[in-house]
Image (cartoon, grey):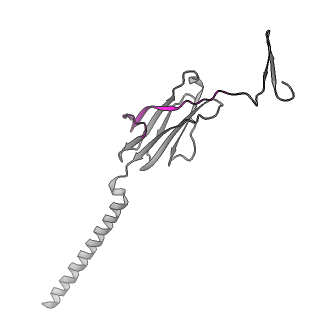
Amino acid sequence: KSPGGVFHFANANAVVRVDPEKAVWPVFDAKPVITGLKVNYAEHQQSDSLLLLQPQERNLTVSFSAVNYRYQEKIQYSYKLEGYDADWVEPPAGMRFATYTNLPYGDYKLKIRCRITGGNWSPNEHTMLVRIITPFWKTTGFFIAMVFVALVAVAFVVWTITSYRHRKRLR
């Protein structure tokens, strides 16, 4: 290594000079793909962009992989369920799935990314929207309807009592 940080390698035919500051490293641009989907621990038909789940379907397992045969053993994955995870989750090497149990009702965005061990994250992320439908009895509209029904019931009871007393006075 020279004082300027340049490395020199010699072989029988030549001397190779490598400047790490000017070296061009291969860009890892593989895009992760979803390879399997389980909802409530049962296989589910795969969707690439939107997963619509019923209120009772709140357990989700997503398997993923990157289509890259050259570095398959060295690929690291990271995933994040926006709206649920605060930060990216980096599973141990070889673990290529994400599991979420008892998810609250609502809308989420699942993001999956990958990289070669020690490298930069690939700019290509896989994104899938996940929507767990809120049951009708937990919606704002249902709550407003129940308040309205309760007010009508109270008004009916007050009217009935008032009209009964009024009729009783007239007799």
On the question of residue 104 being in view, the answer is no
Q: Nearer the viewer, residue 144 or 170?
A: 144
The outermost residue toward the right is 3
Extent of the magenta region: 24-49
Quadrant containing the N terminus in the rendered view: top right
Q: In this picture, is 110 found above or below 23?
A: below
Residue 89: within the magenta?
no
Query: Is residue 25 among what the camera can see?
Result: yes
From this view, report whether residue 127 is shown above or below residue 29. below
Q: Report if residue 32 lies within the magenta region.
A: yes
Image quadrant holding the C terminus, namely bottom left
Q: Quick check: 162 above or below 1? A: below
The residue sitting at the left extreme is 171
Task: Report the residue at 34% width, 52% height from top.
Answer: 135
Could you tell me residue 32's position as x and y percent? Answer: 51, 32
Residue 59, percent from left and from top: 42, 41
Is the magenta region chiefly helix, strand or loop? loop
Residue drawn at 40 percent across, 36 percent down: 47
Where is residue 9? Give x, y as percent: 80, 18
Kindly give the residue lying farthest to the bottom in the view shown: 170
- Residue 70 on image: x %, y %: 57, 21
Quarter of the image where one finds residue 78: top right
Q: Quadrant of residue 136?
A: bottom left
Residue beneath the point at 18% across and 82% down: 164
Position of residue 3 in the picture relative to residue 71 (left or right)? right
Lateral position of residue 66 relative to residue 50, left or right: right
